[in-house]
C-alpha cells in the first residue's frame, strides 16, 4: 500500500466537507475503484418527470428522485449533475457499506483528529442517465450516515487510497448507461457506527424543479 497519501480532515460539528463534483480541467481525478458491490440492485421510486431545459444539455423527461426520499442499499437515485457547463442527470446507487479498522487510516496521516474513529467504506455505482459528456468527472456530496440519522465525518483523499478509491468516470462516461464505481470514506466517532449514506446537492435545484432540492437529503440504509 502506498504511504503518506495526502488527505483533508476538517472537523466542524463532526461533519467534514467532501470535494464537490469536478472535471479534468479542475483537478486530477483518481482511478476508478475495483471494489465489488456488496448488495443487489433494486429500482427506486423517483418523482414525476421534469421537463426542464438547461444550458448545455437537457433534462427533459428525466424522472428525478425527490429530495428526502429514503432508499434501501442497492436502490438507485436519479439526480441532476453538471460539469464543464454541461448539464444532465446521473444515477447514484449505494451498493454496500464496509467497516474498516482504525489502522486503515495510518497512510492518510490524519493525526489526532481521527483518533478513536472507525473508517467505513461507502461503495457507490454512478451511471450516466442522459448521455451527457461527463468524462473525467467525480462524485461528491455524499456522506456516511450515523445511526441517529446525522451525517458523520468523512475524508477527502488527494491521491489514491487503496482501501477506498473515490474513482472518476474516465474518458468513456459520455453515453447513456455508462457507469463507474466510486467510494466515500466515512468515519464513525467512538461509540457510533455508519449505518447508511446520504446525498444532497442544493446547488442544482434549478435543474430539478418540484423535487425539494436543498431541503432534505436522499438517504440509503
Image (cartoon, grey):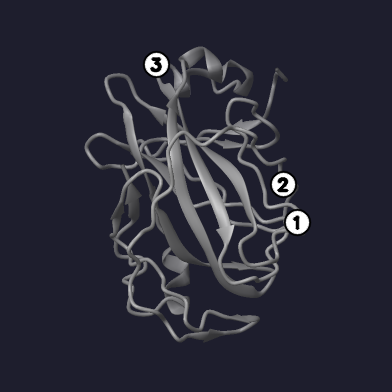
Residue drawn at x 48%, y 85% is 52
Numbered disc 3: secondary structure: loop
Indicate whether 151 appears above or below 51.
above
Callout 2 touching callout 1 (CB < 8 Å): yes
Alpha carbon of mark 2 to alpha carbon of mark 1: how far?
Answer: 7 Å
When asked about the image quadrant of residue 54, the answer is bottom right
Front: mark 3 or 1: 1
Q: Which residue is drawn at 37% across and 27% down?
A: 188
Q: Which of 144 and 20 is in front in this view?
A: 144
SS under mark 1: loop
Q: x, y (%) of residue 64?
A: 41, 70
Q: Which mark is residue 29?
A: 2
Residue 75, how many percent across, how many down? 39, 51
As drawn, 170 above or below 110? below
Mark 1 neighbour density, 10 Å: few (under 14) some (14–19) many (20 or more): some
Q: Relative to 221, is 202 on the left or the right? A: right
Q: Decide which of tag 2 and tag 1 comes sooner along the chain.
A: 1
Residue bearing mark 1: 24
Q: Where is residue 118 in the image (x, y as percent from the top left)?
A: 41, 21
Q: Bin the neighbour count of mark 2 within 10 Å (Cα to Cα): few under 14, some 14-19, many 20 and up.
A: many
Q: Where is residue 155 in the image (x, y as percent from the top left)?
A: 52, 35
Asked whether, in this view, residue 199 is left or right of residue 34, the answer is left
Mark 3 to mark 2 CA distance (whole Å)? 29 Å
Task: Locate the N terminus and report the quarter of the image it occupies.
Answer: top right
Q: Indicate which disc, 3 or 1, sits on the residue closer to the N terminus.
A: 1
72 or 28: nearer the eye? Answer: 72
List the residue tagged with mark 3: 116
Residue drawn 68% across the image and 26% down it = 5
- Foreground disc of the pair 3, 2: 2
Q: Along the polypeptide, which appears first: circle 3 or circle 2? A: 2
Q: Quadrant of residue 24?
A: bottom right
Amino acid at each position: 500500500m502506498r504511504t503518506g497519501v495526502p488527505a483533508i480532515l476538517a472537523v466542524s460539528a463532526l461533519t467534514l466537507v467532501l470535494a464537490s463534483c469536478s472535471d479534468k480541467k479542475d483537478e486530477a481525478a483518481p482511478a476508478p475503484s475495483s471494489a465489488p458491490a456488496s448488495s443487489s440492485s433494486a429500482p427506486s421510486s423517483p418523482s414525476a418527470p421534469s421537463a426542464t431545459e438547461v444550458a448545455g444539455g437537457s433534462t427533459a423527461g428525466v424522472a428525478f428522485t425527490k429530495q428526502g426520499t429514503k432508499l434501501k442499499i442497492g436502490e438507485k437515485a436519479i439526480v441532476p449533475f453538471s460539469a464543464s457547463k454541461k448539464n444532465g442527470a446521473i444515477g447514484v446507487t449505494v451498493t454496500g457499506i464496509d467497516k474498516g479498522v482504525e489502522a486503515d487510516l495510518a497512510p492518510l496521516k490524519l493525526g489526532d483528529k481521527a483518533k478513536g474513529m472507525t473508517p467505513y467504506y461507502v461503495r457507490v455505482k454512478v451511471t450516466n442517465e442522459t448521455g451527457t459528456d461527463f468524462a473525467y468527472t467525480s462524485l461528491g456530496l455524499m456522506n456516511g450516515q450515523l445511526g441517529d440519522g446525522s451525517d458523520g465525518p468523512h475524508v477527502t483523499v488527494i491521491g489514491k487510497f487503496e482501501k477506498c478509491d473515490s474513482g472518476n468516470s474516465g474518458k468513456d462516461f459520455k453515453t447513456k448507461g455508462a457507469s463507474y464505481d466510486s467510494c466515500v470514506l466515512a468515519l464513525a466517532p467512538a461509540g457510533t457506527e455508519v449505518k447508511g449514506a446520504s446525498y444532497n446537492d442544493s446547488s442544482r435545484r434549478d435543474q430539478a424543479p418540484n423535487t425539494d432540492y436543498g431541503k432534505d437529503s436522499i438517504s440509503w440504509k
